[in-house]
Structure formats: C-alpha cells, structure tokens
Amino acid sequence: MDNHYITIENREKITVSSVTDVDAFDEETLWANLTEGSIEITGEKLNIQKLDLAEGTLIVTGRICSLAYTDKSHGTRPGFLKKLTARGSR
C-alpha cells in the first residue's frame, strides 16, 4: 500500500487518503473502500466536505465518534457514489 494517512482535527474533521469509493453514507455512519480494505467512520451530523477519487482523498466534517478499519468492503453492491452518478446520467 502506498503511504496512507488519516488526520483527525479536534474530532470535527477527518481526512482520509487512499479512498477508492464510498459505499454508504448518512449523518451517523460512513463506509469507504480504501486501496486495501475499508474504513467505517461513525459520528453525529457527518457531512462529506470533499470526495476526490482521482486523488483518493475524503474529508468528512461533523462530530467524529469512532473509526475502524475492516478487511472487506461494506457490501458487494455498487458504491454510494456510483449509484448517485448513475441516477444523474439517466
């Protein structure tokens, strides 16, 4: 894996690198796929401030309560972002 980093600022902003997709997202939970494995972020009033898949960067704001790495993606269904872009292209 290339250099991967996570930066949390005052439990109000989290920046994650090596992001390939966002599987699911709401105000309390976000699941994102990384180049190796996945990550789950939980909190309150979560908001995606920036998602740049070309550079692999995800920035989430809100109250960050926890984060956990997982070895598998959240599901086998198409990712959250892919669903949004598919709807917009119809």
Image: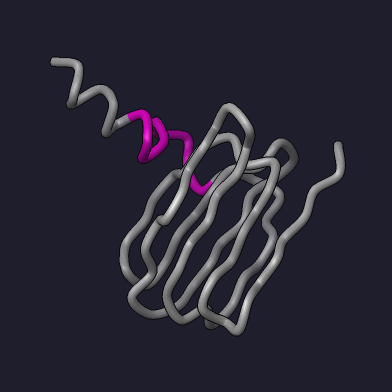
Q: Is 10 left or right of 2, judged from the image as shown?
A: left
Is 15 placed above or below 19 here? below
Name which residue lies at 57% across and 82% down.
11
Instruction: Give the residue at x 18% y 26%.
Output: 87
Residue 56: say if magenta: no
Here the colouring is: one colour
Report x, y in % for residue 53.
Answer: 54, 32
Give the number of callouts.
Answer: 0
State yes or no: residue 78 in magenta: yes
Image quarter where the N terminus lies is: top right
Q: Quadrant of residue 20?
A: top right
Q: Quadrant of the C terminus?
A: top left
Q: Position of residue 84 (x, y in %)?
A: 26, 33
Position of 25 with respect to 67 (left or right) is left
In the foreground, 45 or 76: 45
Query: Which residue appears at 53% of the width and 66% of the height?
Result: 41
Is 67 located above or below residue 21 in the figure? below
Q: Is residue 84 left or right of residue 70?
A: left
Instruction: Please name the residue shown 37% across and 63% down the image.
Output: 47
**Residue 44, x across and y down, in percent:** 38, 80
State the residue in front, 46 or 41: 46
Q: Residue furthest top?
A: 90
Residue range of the region highlighted in magenta in the rendering: 74-82
Residue lying at the far left in this picture: please name it. 90
Which is the main secondary structure of the residues drawn in magenta? loop
Q: Is residue 65 above or below residue 87?
A: below
